[in-house]
Amino acid sequence: MGEELSRNGVHHKSNQDPERGSGSGLCSLLGSKDGDFLLSPTADLVKISDLQGKFIGIYFSANWYPPCRKFTKTLSNAYEQLKKCNVDPGFEVVFVSSDEDLDSFDEYRSSMPWLSIPFSATTTKRALNLRFDVESIPCLIILQPNYDDEQDSRIENGVDVIERYGAKAHPFTKERLEELTEEDKEKRANQTLKEMLTTPERDFLVSHSIPEKVSVASLMGETIGLYFSAQWCSPGEKFTPKLASIYHKIKQESTVDGNNDSFEVIFVSSDKDESSFDSHFYTMPWLALPFSDPTIKNLIKYFDVESIPSLVILSPDGKTVTKQGRNLINLYQEKAYPFTQVRIRSLEMKNDKEAENFPKLRYHSRHDHELTLVSEGKGGGPFICCDCDEQGFGWAYQCIDCGYEVHPKCVRDVEHDSVVES
């Protein structure tokens, strides 16, 4: 069976799948031994043939998995927008449940405005998972109108498409996705602080000191760190004080050097309530977007922030320097500033030079096995240090037996153990 996967995740099938009948279409794909129908949100029966001529999103999800519930809200917003606009061709979603019992299925389905494969149709659900090689959830496969196995064209990365573009992705074609990609490139090439951080109602950031409101315009010409975090985030508890210490050192060195390109950090909060935001922000020496500001969700989506804490660095002209600010702080501390490629490459070369003198083998006081020095590309990165629990990449000491990995600076030799040289 010949297959091609274009960029943007649009899949084209060149030959018929020998395991399915010729022209089996939607009914064969979605139907079950009980009949060719789906469940509506009100549990009414809907003929699968009614979906002909529409884009079909086959949504693999489960009530028990939080990322699924989160994406369901995002997909619902896009779905409702497209319904409201009455787009042509239309868009329909079919839920394929991975829930463990009927009650969970019914509870989850009640939050969805679209159709569902019946919970009892286990053979159909299993066949769909195999048909589209579903390895993780949430997963959204978007089929082109008038689906037929013989002329199968689909978008396989539907979750990414909807999270990135929402309803704007319609009509879900390769050409539309390429158009949106180009718009993204142009937008990023011309991005500014004002465009990213202000709204028609707000042109300021909040501060601990007086004045309590600092205009975004006053930050033009500075290197900016957008710090995505929340009080409930355990890794953030460790990283926030580290970042605060580095922040003060960079500010101090900039003042001593008379550097006009100063450094500022802006807290972008994912806190669940305002009291949590206030107490969390109180521990930080920098600025913040107001709690629950609509810009926050836009920034998380714009920079594809999948986990926190995360530090995105912007150049003095407002362009993105790197989304790996947290890693760079962990590796190089204040020396990482101003986080440019030239600066980081210089530090990498220095690290590579220093690594020539590192012992090739060591024992660490918190691990029983011998550790081997490895470089990036050979096991050194990216990784989470098993000693300090912080991210890193580049050189590392790694246990070949079990994968235990630590920063070179975190290795503490076992007392009375001599360093083993190669």
Image (tube, grey):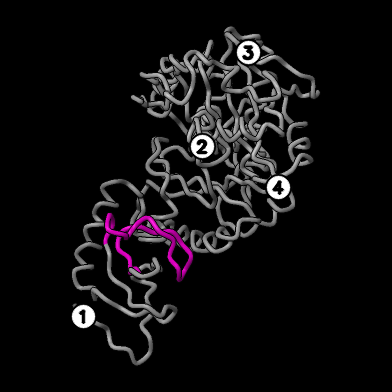
Say what amino acid the circle numbered 1 marks: Glu
Q: Is residue 201 above or below residue 178?
A: below
Write the residue at 47% across / 15% down. 22
Q: Is residue 113 visible?
A: yes
Q: Is residue 208 left or right of residue 169?
A: right
Looking at this view, is 274 or 13 the one in front? 13
Label 2 – label 4 distance at C-alpha:
32 Å
Question: Where does the image place residue 403, in percent across and percent down from the top left?
Answer: 39, 66
Label annotation for residue 134 = 2
Q: Is residue 281 above or below residue 25?
A: below
Q: Is residue 305 left or right of residue 409?
A: right
Q: Which segment did they paint magenta?
A: 375-399
Q: Nearer the viewer, mark 2 or mark 1?
A: 2
Mark closer to the chain start, 2 or 4: 2
Residue tagged by mark 1?
421
Q: Is residue 194 visible?
A: no
Label 3 – label 2 distance at C-alpha:
22 Å
Looking at this view, is 12 or 149 the one in front? 149
The quarter of the picture where residue 60 lies is: top right
Say what amino acid the circle numbered 4 marks: Lys
Residue tagged by mark 4?
272
Write the residue at 41% across / 55% down. 327
Q: Secondary structure at mark 3?
A: helix
